[in-house]
Every structure is written in structure tokens, then in C-alpha cells.
Image: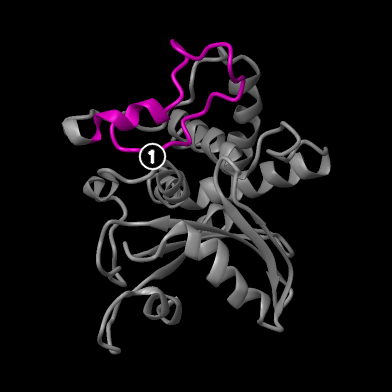
Amino acid sequence: MDQKSHRCADFKWKDVDAGGKLMAFGSYRLGVHSSGADIDTVIIAPRHITRINFFSSFKQILMNDPNVKDLEAVENAFVPIITTTYSGIELDVLFARLKKPTIPRNIDLSDDSLFVNLDEASIRSLNGIRVAEQLLVPNRDTFCQSLRAIKLWAKNHGVYSNAMGFFGGITWAILVARTCQLYPNAAPSKIIQKVFLVFSTWNWPSPVILKHFDCVDSKLANLNKLVWDSRINSSISFDANSDSCIPGT
């Protein structure tokens, strides 16, 4: 990432620590990934690296790497993405461009000010990391064990796929997390049972909310339009879970 950053920067000096960071999210970040599953990642770039760079010169760098196989770029997706296999490991790579000259190694993505005037694609790309960091559950071990079991059940029954219209990994994680909140002292076996009980009788399309946010910064208020609201969009989606950690939601 640093190599790419230096190449694209319009600076007159060579030794510039422009930073750049590759972070994992999804099942891998939650610690519930299975063998052979792909890893969701996002490249966080400084302001002089653009999405055009990501899908042109960075893509070309990957294509020239002998360890890279089956590379595909989907620039016009709801969340633009590059998918590839690197040394036998399947990767989904998103891109987010922050309005900062450098990206520190210890960047805190819970800082809402980072989202001010950020483009929507970058906001959505960073959302997965924030969701993973803000899944507030009483017992992390119980949550992880329960989620592994639920994901295994869904895959074995052929109902684990966002692309096919079913719940994906983050949706199942939210449902399990909400169940853990409702039953904070329950064992994993009980949580698994309650997931099916709670959400088979859920009042859809009421959203599944893990944490309420109060938008106090007027600079962030416009981000509310990126959040699904059952009062406004009741006819759009059945899968109404609060997988958004956009400030102000």
C-alpha cells in the first residue's frame, strides 16, 4: 500500500510516509471464519489516492503478481470491489479514501469526524469494520460459538448468500448479537434456539437495532439518508437489519 501511495502522490520529495492500511472485517475480524472461506478486507487510503487509482494502477499491480489468480473488478457495484485469490486465499477488497494526508497505523474508525464529507462508497466500505467493532454483546465467546453454529446451519441448508437473496454473514451476526443482548446469561445452545424463536416471530420490516445513535453533529446529519428507515422505505427490503454504523443512525 505504501508503494502505491508513493507512486500516486504528486510530491516533489521521495521519502514520504503517506501511510495506507489494509484491514479485515466480516467473519474473519469477528473470529468466526471457516476453513476455505474468503476474507473481507478494505484498503484505507489517504486523500491523494483515488478510486480510479484503485481500479487502474493498483489493479494492474495485482495482475502482475504471480500469486494473484481469478481477479475480477466490479466498479459499479453498490459497494465497489475487487475479488481475487492470493496464494490460494480468496479475498474481497474494498476501497475507502479518507480526507487525510496520511493514514496512521493506529487509526480509530470509531471517530465520527472521519466521515464528514466522505463519499458514499467509502462510507459503505468502512461500515463493515465499524460493525465488527461495535457489535455490543454481553459475552463474546457465547456470541462467537453461537454465530459459528448458525452460519454452519445456514450453509448446510443453502440459505447463506446475500447474492442469492438470503442472509449473509453480517446479517446473521446482527441477529445473533441481538439475541445475545436479549438473553445475556444464556448458553450458546440456548442462544441458537432463541435466534429462530425471536426472528420467526419478528415484526418485519421493523429493523433489528443493536445500538441507538443520536446525531448531534450537523455536519453528519446528511448521512442519515444512507440508513434504511422502515417508515420511509417499507416497500424496499425485507432484510431490515441495522448493519449500519454510520454516525447518526
Location of the C terminus by quadrant is top left
Query: Disc 1 marks which amino acid?
Result: Cys
The image shows residue 73 at horizontal and vertical percentages of 65, 57
Residue drawn 30% across the image and 89% down it: 14
**Way the structure is coloured:** one colour
Does 222 lie within the magenta span? yes
Residue at numbered disc 1: 245
In the depicted structure, whether residue 217 falls above or below residue 42: above
Q: Position of residue 51 (x, y in %)?
A: 47, 57
What residue occupies the far right of the structure in this picture? 157
In the image: residue 4, left or right of residue 101: right
Per the image, label 1 sits on a secondary structure element best described as: loop
Considering the image in quadrants, where does the N terminus appear? bottom left
Q: What stretch is highlighted in magenta?
A: 220-249
Residue 97 position in % (x across, y down):
38, 57
Residue 142 horizontal side relative to residue 224, left or right:
right
Towards the viewer: 204 or 182: 204
* Res 84 quadrant in image: bottom right
Crowd class of label 1 (few under 14; some 14 to 19; many from 20; radius 10 Å): many
- The residue under the point 60% across, 28% down is 194
Can I make out residue 249 in this image? Answer: no
Vertical relation: 178 (above or below) 54: above
Residue 218 pos. (x, y %): 17, 30
Closer to the camera in the image, 8 or 228 = 8
Instruction: Say which residue appears at 59% left-offset and 51% top-offset.
Output: 75
- Vertical relation: 49 (above or below) 64: above
The answer to which quarter of the image holds residue 226 is top left
Question: Magenta residues: mostly which secondary structure?
Answer: loop
> 175 or 169, which lies in front?
169
- Please name the residue shown 33% across and 65% down the image: 48
> Does residue 135 appear in this view?
yes
